[in-house]
Amino acid sequence: MAFHLTDLIGYGAAFLTTVSFVPQAWLTVRTRDVSGISLGMYTLFTAGV
């Protein structure tokens, strides 16, 4: 199976999208404070992916 540039861009975007949740998750685990999390933002972001 040959990889094309568009495949690599898609994999990169998927990786970055997934990793973008890590800082907020880590902060939430450390501080146990979820007041800064917007459920609407996460819902729209996840639905858009």
Image (cartoon, rainbow, N blue to C red):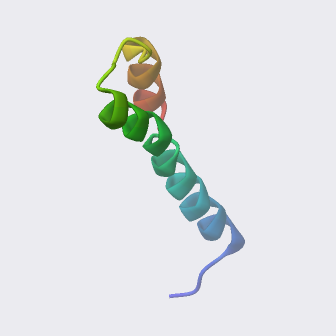
Report the residue that reaches farthest toward the bottom. Answer: 1
Who's the residue at 44% across and 15% down the image?
A: 36
Q: Nearer the viewer, residue 14 or 31?
A: 31
Q: List x then y, in percent, for residue 26.
A: 39, 41
Query: How many marks are shown on the rendered structure?
Result: 0
Q: List x then y, in percent, for residue 8.
A: 63, 69
Who's the residue at 42% across and 34% down the image?
A: 27
**Quadrant of residue 9 within the rendered picture:** bottom right
Q: List x then y, in percent, for residue 1.
A: 50, 88
- Asked if residue 8 lies left or right of residue 11, the reply is right
On screen, residue 43 above or below 14: above
Who's the residue at 60% across and 80% down the image?
A: 3
Q: List x then y, in percent, for residue 10.
A: 58, 59
Report the residue that reaches farthest toward the front. Answer: 31
Who's the residue at 55% across and 63% down the image?
A: 11
